[in-house]
Amino acid sequence: MVIRPALDTDVDSLLKIYAPYVAASSISFECELPSSEEFLQRIIKYQSRWQWLVAEIEGNIVGYAYGSPHRERSAYQWSADVSVYVSALSHGQGIGKKLYLHLLRDLANKGYRQAFAGIAQPNVKSVALHRSVGFELLGVYKSVGFKHGQWHDVAWYQLPLGVGSDMAPTAIL
């Protein structure tokens, strides 16, 4: 398996992975699949400051992970939200964990101090993945998203990166 930064030529493969999460689950709270151009703009935006990685096996993209802003205000600049998506045919092979380990290392190297992950509930496999790389439960937003005719909770997990909050940071912006 090769883990590498996403390229603009990866967009259609990434959308194929993402589409079932949008259309048939509450894992993503997005209700309509973004266009190729919209998705490409996300990649460009997030890759420049955080990171966007893909996992590739024998030339086929099987998953991706990315960092994004936790909140917009400047005091949050050392915190990132993280997400990972793996193709349905590739679940259970450790791809999500490998992507996350690379992503979290890259974010720490860029100076990020905290990673946050919001997991729509229930999602036992995603909770297990996040715990396996060290995330700890912070709390649950109750009935925060409405999709497929029902309300969903989101459990929030946190992982300190690098030196965490032990030292004053240098600016990332």
Image (cartoon, grey):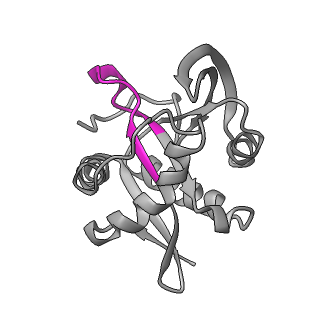
Q: Residue at x 51, y 45 (%)?
A: 23
Horizontal placement of 166 versus 140: left or right? left
Count the marks.
0
Q: Quick check: can you spot residue 47?
A: yes
Q: Residue at x 64, y 21 (%)?
A: 153
Q: Residue at x 36, y 24 (%)?
A: 71
137 vs 19, nearest the viewer = 19
The quadrant of the image that shows the N terminus is bottom right
Residue 112's place in the image compared with 86, above or below, is above
Q: x%, y% of residue 88? A: 64, 61
Residue 67 quadrant: top left
71 vs 29, nearest the viewer = 29
Horizontal placement of 158 versus 124: left or right? left
Residue 94's place in the image compared with 144, above or below, is below
Q: Residue furthest top?
A: 142
- Does the magenta portion include 76? yes
The quadrant of the image that shows the C terminus is top left
Horizontal placement of 172 versus 20: left or right? left
Horizontal placement of 107 versus 10: left or right? right
Q: Quick check: can you spot residue 103?
A: no
Q: x%, y% of residue 98? A: 61, 63
Residue 104's place in the image compared with 148, above or below, is below
Q: Which residues are magenta?
A: 65-81
Q: x%, y% of residue 121? A: 68, 29
Q: x%, y% of residue 85? A: 55, 53
44 vs 51, nearest the viewer = 44
Q: Residue furthest front?
A: 149
Residue 86's place in the image compared with 26, above or below, is below
Q: Residue at x 66, y 18 (%)?
A: 139
